[in-house]
Amino acid sequence: MKAAAYWITGTLLCGVLGICIATTHGVVPLAAHGADGQQAAAAAEEYLGDGTEAESIDTVAKIERTDAEWRAVLTPEQYRILREKGTERAGTGALLHNKEEGVYRCAGCDLPLFLSDGRFDSGCGWPSFFVPLEGAHITETRDTSHDMVRTEITCSRCGGHLGHVFTDGPEPTGLRYCVNSLSIEFEKGAQKPKRPDGETAQR
Ligand SMILES: [Zn+2]
């Protein structure tokens, strides 16, 4: 029902704007995405500020593996999603309904990508976040496959496909990072990054 409501709301909105496209993940206003697809990262960074002390991509070397090496370390399903830009079926992901507190890491290289504090229930059928742990850990790329215009998100360290980011998320960022469960692994109770004032980052 939520997905249906989502669709109907988006369709009505599109009727007003007249510039939307339908996607398998929801409805995306075309005008919200620019050619470089980096608006989401900018919005996320504005929200995050520069105070997080989490592992930064600036200090993490990129990981490059051969196709054979990736096949050796990933399950066939993980390989299909992460390395071949696949999408798990909506509503089927193992982490879709995970309510535990902790950190979500890249399933390909272990880079921390999202916190449980940044999650929200979008009803779209995939784990959804309104903010990444650190904007630099996520790379955005304009994706025009399947006759749609979307912004693909990949892990900045290993290049693994995570999903897409849309601009119909909740406040304060207005973003919806739609992520395959198979692209991420959950670490329960992991320590959260601290703000400069000592406060735990709360969303
Ligand atoms: Zn990775």
Image (tube, rainbow, N blue to C red):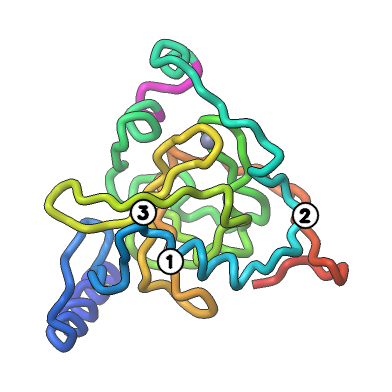
The nearer-to-camera label among 1 and 3 is 1
Quarter of the picture containing the C terminus is bottom right
Horizontal and vertical percent position of residue 133:
62, 56
Rendered location of residue 182, percent (x, y): 43, 38
Residue sitting nearer the eye, 144 or 112: 144
Kind of residue at badge 3: His
Query: Residue 86: x percent and y percent?
Result: 29, 37
Q: CA distance from mark 1 to mark 2?
A: 23 Å
Q: Residue at x 44, y 55 (%)?
A: 127
Q: Position of residue 88 (x, y in %)?
A: 31, 42
Image disc number at residue 53? 2
Residue at the disc numbered 1: 39
Residue type at numbered disc 2: Glu
Q: Nearer the viewer, residue 19 or 202?
A: 19
Type of secondary structure dominating the magenta stretch: helix
Instruction: Name the amino acid type tagged 1.
Output: Gln
Residue 75 colored in magenta in the image = yes
Tag shown at residue 164: 3
Compared to residue 110, the image places residue 46 above or below, namely: below
The part of the image, by quadrant, that contains residue 122 is bottom left
Q: Is residue 22 left or right of residue 171?
A: left
Q: Which residues are magenta?
A: 73-78
Q: Nearer the viewer, residue 42 or 125?
A: 42
Q: Earlier in the sequence, mark 3 or mark 2?
A: 2
Tell me the tag on residue 101. Answer: none
Q: Residues within 10 Å of mark 1 (few under 14, many from 20)?
A: some
Image point (51%, 49%), residue name:
138
Quadrant where the image shows the N terminus: bottom left
Which residue is located at x 30 percent, y 60 percent?
A: 35
CA–CA distance between discs 3 and 2?
A: 25 Å
Q: Measured along the vertical axis of the image, is residue 9 above or below residue 164?
A: below
